[in-house]
Amino acid sequence: MLFLRSLIFNIWVYIAMAIYGIGLSPIGLTSRAGGYWVMKAYSRHVMWVAKHLLGLKWEVRGPVPTEPVLLVSKHQSFVDMMLFMIALPQVKFVMKQELRWTPFLGWYAMRIGTVSVHRGKGGSAVASMTRQFQAQQAAKPGQITIFPQGTRTQPGVEKPYKIGAWRLSQTFADLTCIPVALNTGLFWGKGSFLRRPGTIVLQFLEPLEPGLEAEPFLAEIEQRIETACTALYAEAAAKGEGIAWQSRSA
């Protein structure tokens, strides 16, 4: 039954994307507010179907920011963006260059102020990212969200936290920097066909102390996010939910 439910759900995710993306394009592609409205409606629809078809629920923990902030988040799943879209009023992301022209996803992401970077370009990619956000943040304020590991990373897998998050914190020193933890990879993981029942959690942590240099900034971000994520994995395991995972310290 898990395979069949996952099959139906996975197919519907993309059918619904086309329905919302095309059917509501006169709303979604003519204004930024319209883009948010369509993306939020689609995200809520997908999570409603996930709850009733898969038994996959979700919750948000911690104070949800409503003002412009810098969010530095773990990234484990395609569903992460939908959770941010539902939880936050004007979220915008850093995404890889290849997604810029992806039908529906890329079009709407660019409409709301998401910026794209070439992941293989190193320092020039970071500079491009900061320039793009600087050029539009005043006119398109929002919750800037960066995934510091640069890609989806499964629970228990170690991957370095990159300098781009610190660069953004320096460029936008007036924005509060908030680390974000989640456990989505236990239920809707990268490269996995199956969508498992349980409760996915998006957790906003305590704001970071301002003015940190690069090394202590990245160390503090990693320590806070990984510690909180590990607690979420253990919580799910205690309930018998999600996939098995291995601690980084194991």
Image (spheres, rainbow, N blue to C red):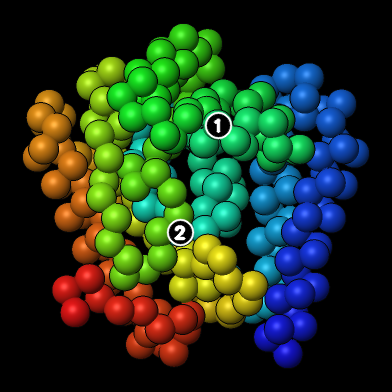
Judging depth in this view, the residue of 14 and 44 nearest the camera is: 14
Q: Quadrant of the N terminus?
A: bottom right
Horizontal side of 43 relative to 205 (left or right) equals: right
Residue type highlighted by circle 2: Gln
Q: Quadrant of residue 130?
A: top left
Pointer 2 residue = 76
Q: Residue 164: where, in percent of width, then height? A: 30, 31
Q: Tell me which residue sits at (28%, 61%) in the image.
A: 158
Element under disc 2: loop
- Determine the residue positioned at 45% across, 59% down: 76
Above or below, 159 relative to 194: above
The image shows a total of numbered marks equal to 2
Q: Are marks 1 and 2 in contact (CB under 8 Å)?
A: no
Report helix, strand or loop for mark 1. Answer: helix
The picture places residue 42, in percent across and down from the top left corner, at 73, 48
Q: Is residue 137 visible?
A: no
Above/below status of 98 relative to 194: above
- Quadrant where the C terminus sits is bottom left
The residue lying at 81 percent from left, 39 percent from top is 21
Q: Which residue is mark 1?
A: 97
Residue 107 as seen in the image, left or right of residue 196: right
| Residue in the foreground of this view, choosing between 46 and 1 | 1
Name which of mark 1 and mark 2 comes first in the sequence. Answer: 2
Residue at 78% across, 19% down? 30
Residue 234 image offset from top left, x and y in percent = 31, 79
Given the image, on which type of amino acid does mark 1 rest? Gln
Q: Quadrant of residue 107?
A: top right
Q: Nearer the viewer, mark 1 or mark 2?
A: 1
